[in-house]
Amino acid sequence: MRIQIAGIERHSSVNGPGVRYVLFTQGCPHACPGCQNPDTWSPTAGVSYDTEDIINDILSTKYIDGVTLSGGDPLFQAKPILEIVKALNEKKINIWCYTGWTYEQLDSLQAGPEAKEVLSYLDVLVDGRFVLSLLSRDCIYRGSTNQRLIDCKKSIQEGKVVEMTSFNYGL
């Protein structure tokens, strides 16, 4: 399956806890004012990759604590993202995902059935649009105070949003 990618950072320390492989996907319907990655909004820009090549690159990258899906909005391309997270989950790799949709919107299928299914493979979802007027330097791993760090496994288990309460952030 093909996926449009804006960029890859194999060893990042700013996109989640530890050293992370970061996949910046292409395409975002939210177009948040003040977005740090507006060049990722167009769904046709970037480079097309085969998901198997992405998976193999991640699995061959040494010294990472996990994978972060960013963008754009990774769930804009939910089908190929689902393929990637399934493969990573089988290898017990910690997975974070940033999205402009809220957990509730994803759970109610507003972004489609594949986007909802992706939730079951994530450790942490950072949800919500970036809101420039709510910008805060005090929000660890988030840009604005409306965005949440959600423990996906506990949220699914409890049937409600469970925000991260400890600083291990799903590692």
Image: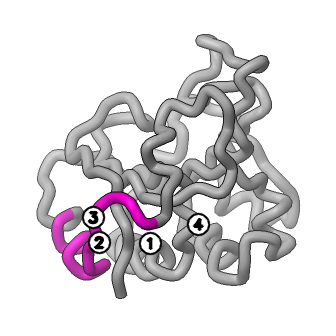
Give the residue number, with chain letter if any, for mark 4.
76
Q: Are marks 2 and 4 in contact (CB under 8 Å)?
A: no
Give the residue number, with chain letter if any, for mark 2.
48
Q: Toward which corner of the image does residue 113 lie, by quadrant? A: bottom right
Quadrant that contains the N terminus: bottom left
Q: Which residue is found at the position 71% from the left and 22% from the top?
A: 132
Q: Position of residue 13 (x, y in %)?
A: 32, 30
Q: Start and end of the magenta stretch?
A: 44-57
Q: Amino acid at mark 4?
A: Phe
Q: Earlier in the sequence, mark 1 or mark 4?
A: 4
Q: Amino acid at mark 2?
A: Ser
Q: How much space separates mark 2 and mark 1, taking CA atoms?
A: 18 Å
Q: Are marks 2 and 3 in contact (CB under 8 Å)?
A: yes
Q: How much space separates mark 3 and mark 1, taking CA atoms?
A: 20 Å
Element carrying mark 2: strand
In this view, 57 is above or below 165: below
Q: How is the image coloured?
A: one colour
Q: Earlier in the sequence, mark 4 or mark 3?
A: 3
Q: Earlier in the sequence, mark 2 or mark 4?
A: 2
Give the residue number, with chain letter if any, for mark 1.
85
Give the residue number, with chain letter if any, for mark 3.
47
Circle 3 residues within 10 Å: few <14, some 14–19, many ≥20? few
